[in-house]
Amino acid sequence: MIQEITSAATSQNQCPALHRTVKVQGLTVFDYGCGKYTKGRDALLSRGAYDVIRFDPFHFSKEWNDHSIDYCELAEVVLCANVLNVLHSHELLDGVVLVLHNIAALSGADVHVSVYEGDRSGVGKETSRGYQRNAKAKDYEAVLSAHFNTVTRNGNTFTCSLKEL
């Protein structure tokens, strides 16, 4: 899967809201699409995370990311903040969700996903920083539900699990 419209410039030097709300005390966190800045990692560690495994195909080398994947089974919680909304094609979207599923399958962790809704028009477009899907949060439920047994939504945040309720 090649991402025709890069999302590298969408990385912002701020802490995603998801990183301030998910329970991380004493846990190892896998941060998928963490971006090049460390404010998210720093916030997780200051909130008591035991460790943060960072993965980002645009901001880390293949060796770094391969190493992160090698240790993903240690994750006790998986975060994916504002990644799905910058993916141009449904194939890329489905591919990223499949990777999140595989990390959850290896680790047993729940996956927490947040999306930025943009203008909520449902009409994706290129921006000065890359691409924005402009999809409503509810529009991501189908692709998440295709890969996880349980998906719950609270606003623009999803908790996805392979565990049966």
Image: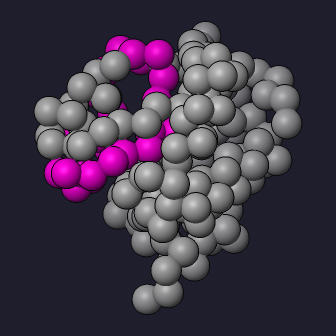
Residue 160 percent location from the top left of the image? 48, 66
Instruction: Please state the total of marks drawn on the protein image.
Output: 0
Q: Nearer the viewer, residue 11 or 120?
A: 11
Q: Main secondary structure of the magenta part?
A: loop
Quadrant for residue 12, please give it.
top left
Residue 20 % position (x, y):
22, 41
93 or 108, which lies in front?
108
Q: Residue at x 69, y 70 (%)?
A: 146
Question: Does residue 59 appear left or right of residue 77 in this picture?
Answer: right
Asked if residue 30 is among those painted magenta in the image, a careful observer would answer yes
Position of residue 95 in the picture relative to residue 14 (left or right): right
Q: Which residues are magenta?
A: 12-37
The relative height of residue 92 versus residue 8 in the rendered view (above or below) is below
Q: Nearer the viewer, residue 74 or 30?
A: 74
Q: Quadrant of the C terminus?
A: bottom left
Q: Is residue 78 above or below residue 164?
A: above
* Residue nearest the viewer, comparing 146 with 129: 146
Residue drawn where x is 31% and y is 29% of the image: 41
**Location of residue 62 in the rendering, given as x and y in whole percent from the top left corner:** 69, 22
Any part of residue 105 in sight: yes
Q: Quadrant of the N terminus?
A: top right
Name the image colouring: one colour
Q: Residue at x 44, y 52 (%)?
A: 74
In the displayed structure, 12 sits above or below 153; it is above
Q: Residue furthest bottom?
A: 165
Coordinates of residue 90 in the picture (x, y in percent): 78, 48
